[in-house]
Amino acid sequence: VGSTAFQSRVVSEKPLKSDLMNFIQFGAWLDPELFAESSVVPVYETLADDAERSADDLFGDQSQSIMLVGTSYTKIEDWNFAGFLREALQNDLLTIAVEGRGPLQAMQEFLDSPSLQDDDIQVVIWEYPVRTLLAQRSPTRPWQISSANHP
């Protein structure tokens, strides 16, 4: 897509407890740490290559043509979602992300923002978690049921 080289690298590690553990009710007598181990995950940062940064410093900021609209996965820097996209697309990007309010709220914030009118933005990437889709499915017609069996 672009021509700017970005590179992601591990800068540290941190323990991670699944966010789904927040939804499980535990009795006061039961410590969830007894059976729910924390994982250690790498923390990344993504930077433009030194030559790319020097050119940007010399010629000033270039306009961005890609907008990433996202949820907590985009907002929380420990996940480095935007960084990995920069690296894969070889392009810098702008972000609008909200934590804990879902993908629909994030898109609404983008639609209400001045960024929607920005002629430089040519592509919008909408990060939409799969578990959000699954949570919204109809209990009487799950996504696994083929439409051939249920017109």
Image (cartoon, rainbow, N blue to C red):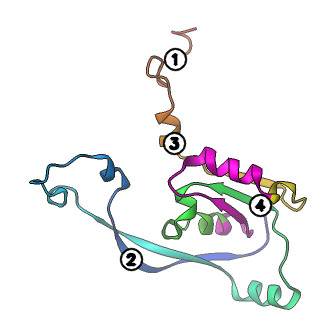
Q: Which mark is residue 130?
A: 3
First to last magenta residue range: 86-113
Per the rendering, the mark at residue 13 is 2
Residue at the image point whose x is 32% and y is 47% from the top:
23
Q: Secondary structure at mark 4?
A: strand
Left or right for 42, reference 150: left
**Is disc 2 surrounded by few (<14), some (14 to 19) or many (20+) residues within 10 Å?**
few
Quadrant assignment for the N terminus: bottom right
Per the model, the C-alpha gap separating discs 1 and 3 is 19 Å
Between disc 1 and disc 4, the foreground one is 4
Q: Is residue 32 magenta?
A: no
Q: Nearer the viewer, residue 4 or 66?
A: 66
Three-letter amino acid code of the residue under disc 1: Ser
- 97 or 148, which lies in front? 97
Q: Are marks 1 and 2 in contact (CB under 8 Å)?
A: no
Q: In front here: 126 or 2?
A: 126
Q: Nearer the viewer, mark 1 or mark 3?
A: 3
- Name which of mark 1 and mark 3 comes first in the sequence: 3
How far is the residue under mark 3 from the one under mark 2? Answer: 26 Å
Residue that label 1 marks: 146
Tell me which numbered mark, 1 or 4, is placed earlier along the sequence: 4
Residue 148 percent coordinates (x, y): 56, 11
Residue 26 appears at what percent x and percent y? 19, 49
Image position of 40 (left or right of 105): left
**Distance CA(mark 2)–CA(mark 4):** 29 Å
Write the residue at 52% across / 65% down.
76
Kindly identify which numbered label has been placed on residue 66.
4
Q: Residue at x 59, y 47 (%)?
A: 103
